[in-house]
Image (cartoon, rainbow, N blue to C red):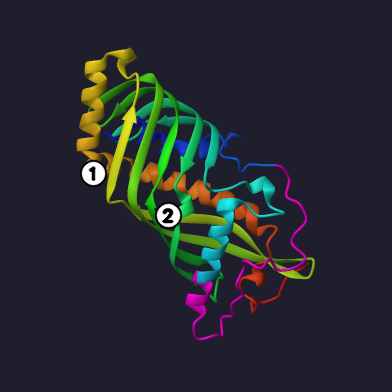
Amino acid sequence: MSAACWNVWSTVPQLVRMFWVVSLLALSLPAASASFETKPEFIKTCRFDQPDFVDCSTESVQGLFDKLVTGIEGLEHVGTIDPMKISKIRILQGDGPVSVNASLSKVVVTGFASTKVLRNVVSSKDFGWETHIRLPKMRLEGNYHMQGRILVIPLNGHGKCWFEPSGMDIIMRTSTDLYQKNGHVFYNVSGTKVDYTISGLRLHMGNLFEGVKVLEDSTNQYLNDNWRPVSEALKPIIAKTIEDILLAIMQNIFHQLPADYFVADLPRSGSS
């Protein structure tokens, strides 16, 4: 089915959920520093009671993504989202059309610098949010080692791989609770669900079938020519991957950046 590479990325969540290996990204990092005592300039503060709240909130989240590209002073442990580095990924998937035992190492993900936040809606009831994101192109590169099957295609090899999904539209639904600390309201991000579509996919896995070039070339060609069914077969895994990456980022950020810097009229309740 889909390229091991494509599958590899999608496995990040499998790994994260089954092993939560420290290497998930440069995000499972050192303990967070103290929360921000003053609001950073890149955050636009909005209010539920303003008529253009959704537009304001969308602009505020876009500002956050833009800063994450270069890194945020005080959140150095979070790193940057472009490039995003993952040191080690273990892949175990045994159900459905995808069955693989694989690992990826020295993974670099690029393309998030072009993230466009189309819409961000924050609920005034449960304070979770729904974010629509567009990513024109993303590229993943790394070293892989795998044995398995994607649909009817056996995959066996080790070497370098890359994949490039394009035209990715992501809808992220985030659940959160509010808590108080140091005189501010904070988000305790508890989960996220992701759905997405893509308009294209290119990929390549080197040294498949222990270097049998004819099989390697024909397999890569088949996977690229049939990217639609490949991506559909891997979609549940890929969605989990995106969920875990975004959840790790948000949990790191929002335990330090007060939620009331983003939405000024969040309710204050609970213990500080």
Q: Assess disc 2: are there few (<14), some (14-19) or many (≥20) residues with their C-alpha within 10 Å of its C-alpha.
A: many
Q: So how many labels did they put on this image? A: 2
Judging from the image, what secondary structure is the residue with disc 1 in?
helix
Q: Quadrant of residue 223?
A: top left
Which residue lies under the disc numbered 2? 194
Q: In the drawing, what numbered circle is on residue 228?
A: 1
Relative to 210, residue 254 above or below: below
Quadrant that contains the N terminus: top left
Of 262 and 97, the residue lying toward us: 262
Magenta stretch? 30-58
Of 140 and 242, the residue lying toward us: 140
Would you say 35 lies left or right of 67 here? right
- Relative image position of residue 121 (x, y in whole percent): 48, 71
Q: CA gap, disc 2 to disc 1?
A: 19 Å
Q: Is residue 65 magenta?
A: no
Mainly helix, strand or loop, the magenta region? loop
Look at label 2 and name its amino acid. Answer: Val
- Relative image position of residue 29 (x, y in whole percent): 67, 42
At 43% from the left and 25% from the top, the residue drawn is: 102
- Relative image position of residue 232 (x, y in whole percent): 28, 44
Quadrant that contains the C terminus: bottom right
Q: Assess disc 1: are there few (<14), some (14-19) or many (≥20) residues with their C-alpha within 10 Å of its C-alpha.
A: some
Look at label 1 and name its amino acid. Answer: Arg
Would you say 216 lies left or right of 18 here? left
Q: In the drawing, what numbered circle is on residue 185?
A: none
Q: Quadrant of residue 155?
A: top left
Q: Quadrant of residue 117?
A: bottom left
